[in-house]
Amino acid sequence: MAHHHHHHDSLYCSEQHYFDDEEHDHVFLEQDMLCDDSELKTLVSKEQEQEKNLSILCIDEWERREAVEWILRVNAYFSFSALTASLAVNYLHRFLFTFTMKKNQPWLTHLAAVACISLAAKMEETQVPLPLDLQVEDSKYVFEAKTIKKMEILVLSTLEWKMNPPTPLSFIDYITRRLKCFHFLNTCQSLLLSLLPDSRFIGYLPSVLATATMMHVVNNNVEPCLASEYQNQFLGILEINKAKLEECYNVILEVVSESGFNYKESKKRNFGSIIIPSSPSGVIDVSFSFDHHDSSNDSWEVVSANDSVSSTPNSINKKRPRTQEHTASFEQFKQ
């Protein structure tokens, strides 16, 4: 008997063995041909505009990794979205690439991390903790609110107010909507966030990292024949460099092998609840002066420092943090 089904009918999702507790459409068809391609074109265009060799950062790698891990822990603490974490890390990397950092000033990297998660939260979250309350999860330093706000201004200026860049999550979101494979979304988000601390991924375009991440999730959750079909669809949509994709995929294999990423847990876990090694405990109270007319590192000076280790402020409340309203100034760069 002749079969007249489109070849993509073979992609009826048989992965319910892995996702039987989730409600989703089991039909994987390229049925969104009416999907507006302008969104993808915009993402690709922005990606090309911002392409820089971010793999060369003039900063101590341990400081950068520590800052990224802290951002992810704070993101989990407040149950922020995966996009908030992804944006915060994007801001941090772009800032560190552009802004000349002096050596022996680890506090500056951490201050930048605080400002970046604060800005990302203002972009994406409906409730944003006050600057002081954001400094949780073994924060090594505690900065005054006015100091954080000055750093936010410096970050905004350094990034030229381009605060809605394409991230790997932008492409993952587009693909899952285009191909109706929403059941993979949480797992892809969890895996992606677990990769961000590793500096090897900085040099890959967001579209490449997104595709490699989705391929890894698919390969670990569906049968080989279906995995191949998924991969063909991913490549057909994004048309990315296959050599770079394979290289990125192999790095993911290494990281997952070392970290022991758990797929069963990832589809149920909160976005940020990825196990990240804790930073040294204790915080140091410091305050800094900033001349907003001078964007160089020289304008940051330690005014006073209390070397005694203190506990995190008691005012911090995980479940009911004090929040601040979004200001109108942030609307102009959400476009």
Image (spheres, helix red, strand yellow):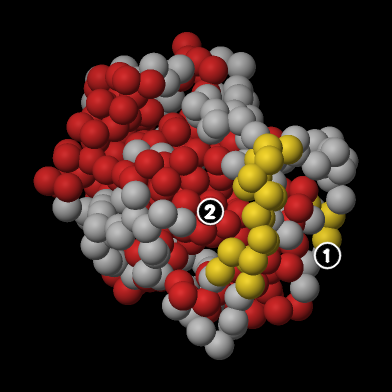
Q: Amino acid at mark 1?
A: Glu
Q: In the image shown, does 36 or 194 lie closer to the viewer?
A: 194
Q: Amino acid at mark 2?
A: Trp
Q: In the image shown, does 278 or 211 lie closer to the viewer?
A: 278
For the view shown, which residue lies furthest in the left direction?
A: 243
Crowd around label 2: few <14 · some 14–19 · many ≥20 (10 Å): some
How far apart marks 2 and 1 lie (CA) works out to 28 Å
* Residue 255 visible within the image: yes
Determine whether 254 is above or below 68 in the image: above
Image spot of residue 209 (x, y percent): 32, 46
Check residue 107 in the rendering and tell me which mark sits there, or answer none. 2
Q: Is residue 57 left or right of residue 262?
A: left
Determine whether 121 is above or below 152 in the image: above
The residue lying at 61 percent from left, 30 percent from top is 281
Determine whether 313 is above or below 94 in the image: above
**Quadrant of residue 231 in the image?**
top left
Image spot of residue 13 (x, y percent): 43, 25
Q: In this figure, which residue is indicated by the disc labeled 1? A: 325
Q: Is residue 180 left or right of residue 136?
A: left
